[in-house]
């Protein structure tokens, strides 16, 4: 493969005495679809927060394409090519679905650019293309807060694709979805992963089984296991910590 | 190509920047106001000029609050600065030509406070051109400094409101304290005022220009970005927008607009005092914008004329309780019409279109009594938003 796009060494995060991430070593290869598993409180979302620049880590280094991005502001990390999705869908509620994607198109992030930029036909076509990709093209003119929960999740993913990042961080995109919607989301992620590197936090084992060939299991701020899904599922330690609920049975 | 087809197919109704009916409407209103002095009373003409100045001020609040989600309770700082620059300038040139009782050629209040000549730093203000340049530059600079301090440190929402309120109080104290230069508590008055039909036309012209500029700003790409920052600043930040810069930009723009309004006001009214820089006027401006519809550009004008007009009417008819009535009106608007008059009208039109689009796309719309209630309710209030959400213009749901 073409090497590691994301390289995390010794990442530590402490919040008022609690250690959330503890000396974590973790890397993602280019063009990979990596699934991040772990029980509640394992530090999955915190890890995403650290990579995307929401909070600064206490210690350690995050390298993206061999450049240090530790503790940079979110918009700077975005500029390097990382875009994240939030667990709860986050979008611009009063803007139309179309505008939500339009605003997220790559480029034109400076005030001056926004001031003088005119949307071209190419931009519009690109937006329509993305809306077709996420299946929301019929609702292009609706305000975002008229969408259902599942549609919101897809819209946010569409916004991520619009920005055309090198690495997508997807934080539990299937939370609160119906089974049918989950299937559709899994399809979508698979298609996104054909063109982008994706780091996916996921709880639902059906989805993981469909997508994950290589998974990382986090537990108490450290990595418990890493490898192909079948190996990890067979891992006795993982079973004890995470799969006590029998989710993996029959795998 | 696909674009045109797409726009038609997907209900992408893009409103033209300046729809014909709005041009006609504005032209009609401007014509009525501009010709009023020919047949109306001077008292009402005075009020009209003042209302238009205040409308521009309310528009500036609407830009930062309604479109960018910044609730500033100190916008009168910039209004007041503009007003003081112009008033000082007019006063200085008036004093130079009309010696005081004691023969001095400096403004009377300076003389009373023991000054014998105009401070060198103020002397150039005598030329109105210098004053106008100062009016455009210094309030914007101050807004830039305050903006950097506030927004770069990620302070917004309620905290921003409190900080700007404090800034307004400080400036007010400052003006009262340094009365030798500012006229102190009494303010600056007794200078040549521009209170005639021609200056009313100037005010109207500036108002129309700024109105068009605001419409242009809010309906171009940057307007969409500002709305996205208002809706969800976290998402915008992670979408690569440096939110603080956008806030600073719109804050500076609005402050310059407020200063222009202040300058016109000073020339029109012939008196400027510390009250024109303080929190009271700032909050009044917020009310005007809220009542008219803070996320529209026409709303502030309607809100100002309505509230200010009601104020003059009520203070004559209901002298003992008019402030109470105004307070109740504001609570009513925030609670039941969070989008203001124009915002509510605009929203119901948009909802009508949306419903039509639903019906077209064969998406069976719920019917029955419950659906009617839900629709009625959401037309007036958004169930997901609380009182503070309404006040700060943010959506209730967030991460």
Image: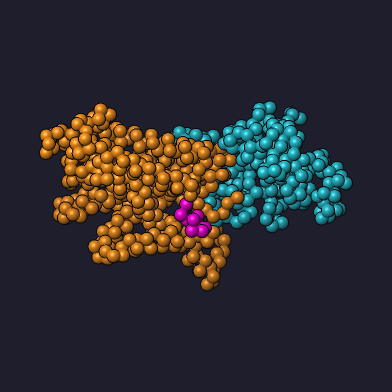
Q: Position of residue B327 (x, y in %)?
A: 37, 60
Judged left or right of residue B105, residue B125 is right
**Compared to B68, does B319 lie above or below?**
below
Count of labels shown?
0
* Most common SS among magenta residues: helix
Q: Residue furthest front?
A: B114
Q: Residue at x 59, y 37 (%)?
A: A74
Q: As rendered, which of A249 and B43 lies closer to the eye? A: B43
Q: Is residue B391 magenta?
A: yes
Q: Is residue A47 magenta?
A: no
On screen, B326 above or below A220?
A: below
Q: How is the image coloured?
A: by chain
Q: Nearer the viewer, residue B187 or B203?
A: B187
Measured as percent of width and height from the top left, residue B306 is found at 31, 58
Find chain B in the image and tell me its colour.
orange
- Which residue corresponds to the image point at 44% horizontal and 38% vertical from the top-left? B147
Q: Nearer the viewer, residue A138 or A1?
A: A1
Q: Residue furthest bottom?
A: B369
Q: Is residue B28 left or right of residue A52?
A: left
**Vertical arrangement, residue B155 with respect to residue B353, above or below:** above
In the rendered image, residue B301, in percent from the top left (x then y), is placed at: 32, 52
Residue at image coords 65%, 29%: A68
Can residue A14 be seen here? The reply is: yes
- Chain cyan in the figure, letter: A
Quarter residue B349 falls in: bottom left
Q: Which residues are magenta?
A: B385-393
Q: Residue at position x 39%, y 54% from top?
A: B290
Residue A118 in view here: no
Left or right, residue B343 beside residue B153: left
Can you give x and y, in whole percent of width and height, for residue B333 in the image?
A: 41, 60
């Amino acid at each position: 493969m073409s090497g590691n796009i994301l390289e995390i060494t010794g990442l530590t995060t402490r919040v008022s005495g609690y250690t959330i991430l503890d000396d974590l070593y973790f890397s993602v290869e280019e063009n990979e679809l990596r699934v991040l598993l772990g029980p509640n409180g394992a530090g999955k979302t915190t890890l995403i927060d650290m990579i995307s620049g929401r909070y600064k880590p206490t210690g350690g280094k995050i390298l993206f394409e061999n450049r240090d991005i530790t503790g940079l502001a979110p918009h700077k990390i975005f500029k390097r090519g990382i875009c994240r999705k939030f667990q709860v869908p986050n979008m611009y509620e009063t803007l139309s679905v179309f505008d939500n994607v339009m605003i997220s198109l790559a480029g034109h992030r400076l005030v001056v650019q926004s001031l003088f930029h005119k949307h071209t036909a190419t931009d519009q076509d690109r937006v329509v293309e993305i809306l077709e990709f996420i299946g929301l093209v019929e609702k292009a003119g609706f305000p975002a807060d008229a969408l259902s929960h599942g549609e919101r999740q897809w819209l946010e993913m569409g916004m991520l694709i619009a920005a055309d990042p090198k690495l997508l961080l997807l934080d539990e995109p299937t939370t609160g979805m119906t089974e049918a919607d989950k299937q559709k989301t899994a399809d979508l992620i698979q298609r996104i992963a054909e063109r982008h590197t994706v780091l996916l936090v996921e709880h639902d084992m059906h989805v993981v089984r469909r997508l994950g060939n290589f998974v990382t299991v986090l537990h108490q701020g450290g990595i418990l296991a890493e490898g192909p899904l079948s190996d990890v599922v067979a891992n006795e330690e993982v079973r004890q910590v995470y799969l006590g609920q029998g989710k993996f049975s029959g795998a | 190509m696909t674009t045109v087809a797409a726009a038609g197919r997907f209900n992408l109704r893009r409103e033209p920047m300046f729809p014909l009916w709005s041009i006609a409407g504005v032209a009609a209103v401007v014509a009525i106001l501009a010709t009023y002095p020919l047949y109306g009373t001077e008292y009402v003409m005075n009020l009209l000029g003042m209302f238009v100045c205040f409308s521009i001020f309310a528009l500036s609040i609407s830009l930062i609050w309604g479109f960018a989600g910044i609730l500033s309770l100190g916008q009168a700082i910039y209004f007041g600065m503009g007003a003081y620059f112009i008033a000082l300038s007019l006063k200085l040139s008036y004093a130079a030509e009309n010696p005081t009782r004691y023969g001095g050629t400096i403004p009377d209040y300076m003389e009373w406070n023991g000054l014998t000549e105009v401070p060198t730093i103020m002397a150039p203000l005598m030329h109105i051109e210098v004053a106008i340049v100062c009016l455009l530059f210094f309030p914007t600079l101050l807004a830039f400094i305050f903006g950097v301090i506030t927004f770069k440190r990620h302070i917004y929402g309620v905290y921003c409101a409190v900080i700007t309120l404090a800034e307004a109080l400080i400036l007010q104290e400052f003006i009262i304290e340094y009365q030798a230069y500012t006229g102190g508590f009494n303010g600056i008055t007794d200078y040549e005022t521009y209170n005639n039909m021609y200056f009313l036309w100037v005010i109207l012209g500036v108002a129309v220009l700024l109105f068009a500029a605001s419409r242009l700003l809010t309906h171009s790409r940057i307007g969409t970005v500002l709305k996205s920052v208002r809706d969800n600043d976290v998402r915008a930040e992670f979408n690569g927008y440096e939110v603080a810069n956008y806030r600073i930009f719109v804050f500076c723009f609005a402050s310059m607009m407020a200063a222009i309004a202040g300058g016109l006001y000073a020339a029109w009214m012939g008196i400027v005092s510390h009250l024109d820089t303080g929190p009271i006027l700032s909050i009044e401006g917020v009310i005007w914008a809220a009542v008219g519809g803070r996320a529209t550009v026409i709303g502030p004008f309607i809100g100002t004329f309505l509230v200010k007009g009601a104020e003059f009417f009520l203070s004559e008819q209901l002298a003992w309780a008019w402030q109470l009535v105004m307070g109740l009106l504001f609570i009513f608007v925030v609670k039941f019409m969070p989008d203001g008059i124009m915002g509510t009208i605009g929203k119901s039109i948009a909802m009508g279109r949306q419903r039509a689009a639903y019906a077209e796309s064969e998406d069976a719309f719920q019917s029955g009594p419950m659906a009617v209630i839900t629709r009625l309710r959401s037309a007036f209030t958004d169930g997901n938003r609380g009182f503070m959400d309404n006040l700060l213009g943010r959506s209730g749901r967030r991460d």
